[in-house]
Image (cartoon, rainbow, N blue to C red):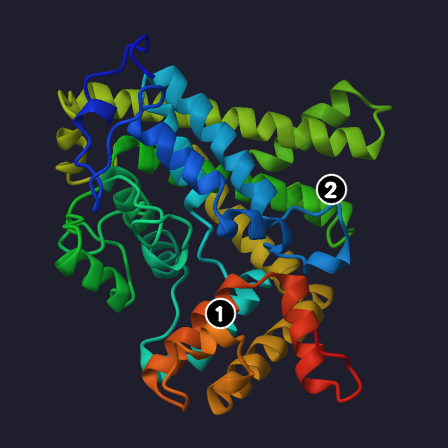
Amino acid sequence: MNDFIQFAPYASMPQDSKGRVFAEPESATRSCHQRDRDRIIHSAAFRRLQYKTQVFVNHEGDFFRTRLTHSLEVAQIARTVCRYLHLNQELAESLALAHDLGHPPFGHAGEEALDEALAPYGGFDHNAQSLCVIATLEQRYAEFDGLNLTWETVEGVVKHNGPLLGPNTTFAKPIPQAILDYDQNVMDLELTKFSSLEAQIAALSDDIAYNNHDIDDALRARLIRIDDLKDIPVVGQTFFEISKQYPDLDKSRLIYEAVRRLIGDMVNDLLQETQQRIKDAQPKHSEDIRNQNFPIASFSERIKQCDKELKAFMFENVYRHYKINRMTSKARRVVRDLFKLFMQEPNCLPTDWFKLTDGKPSEKTAKVVADYIAGITDRYALDEHSRLFDVQARNS
């Protein structure tokens, strides 16, 4: 339990949790948010992240990061920040581990293909899909579908990037119907408010891990050179300082040392800026965090500018590199082909999934097909495509 931990007054206290959809007896050995974390780790969707990619398709190399390794790295950063700020580490860890559960195979390429295929039915949103995974699609427990996570964890999954409605929202697209339905019919997620400080920190920990580890992977894949980074604020200076300090350091260690320092710099910046905002806002309760008109967890303007320029550089030089374009083009074709075939012939779905459809093209069938495709891994999607489109492939 967390009884020995001295929480800050504005932390998400486990004993003050708003509870679960289905009431359960409390554990004698774990807090409610520890149980959330453990349920996420034991879920099938979490295990499948091992074979889902961020940028590189899974079979391109075992060294590159997957959604699973990325989620573990985000969790480590979020725990570190929350420990220092005396926040609820288990809640932040739960959110870090759950934030990618709704991603389909092949990273952004798979999501774009599914969104395009589902355009007549409201499109596809990985955040809404994460909600569907934890609310219904995981089927492990005798008394309920989903993972039956606490309100704080569900809220953080849905709102980790800020309010979805109201004057403080930065959400540009229409709110996914799955989120609206859950908010109206299952749990009031207070969509006009900010999420907990733990959720805000988990979201920024995602940015820290994502940016720095994409630099690492892109350099090791030789899509970019170290010298290409020289004009990016903070990043270029960090590589320069290490090269000057260790002129004979081999490239692999230079990259690792730079990524390590960049992560440390961003973590320290996040801590300093967040502490200043806490001091200015003087929150006395976790609800004071939610009721602010701005996020309490934040980077400084220095790191925000670095983040902006780094994202622009990576988009132009890595995410749109011709080698990545070839992989993502293939990935989009695989997802489009699978969706089209299953929509026209839903009886080609595994039997348990086919039973959930209308047996014909329809909005209901489209949702089932999307859930099925979003849940499979990169390599399973490639195998499934081969089984269905290669006339000589064996079915199993």
Q: Which residue is mark 2?
A: 226
Q: For mark 1, does the 10 Å Cα neighbourhood hold few (<14), some (14 to 19), or many (20 or more) residues?
A: some
Seen from the viewer's position, the closer of residues 47 and 281 is: 47
Upstream in sequence: badge 1 or badge 2:
2
Seen from the viewer's position, the closer of residues 232 and 294 is: 294
Residue 160: which quarter of the image? top left
| Residue at the image position 40 percent from the left and 28 percent from the top | 270
Q: Tag on residue 372?
A: 1
| Residue at the image position 37 percent from the left and 48 percent from the top | 141
- Report the mark closest to the observer, 1 or 2: 1
**Position of 348 compared to 289: left or right?**
right
- SS of the residue under disc 2: helix
Residue 232: which quarter of the image? top right
Image coords of residue 259 (percent x, y):
64, 32
| Residue at the image position 82 percent from the left and 34 percent from the top | 251
Q: Amino acid at mark 2?
A: Ile
- Above or below, 47 relative to 250: below
Visible in this render: residue 266? no
Q: Amino acid at mark 1?
A: Tyr
Image coords of residue 83 (percent x, y):
40, 18
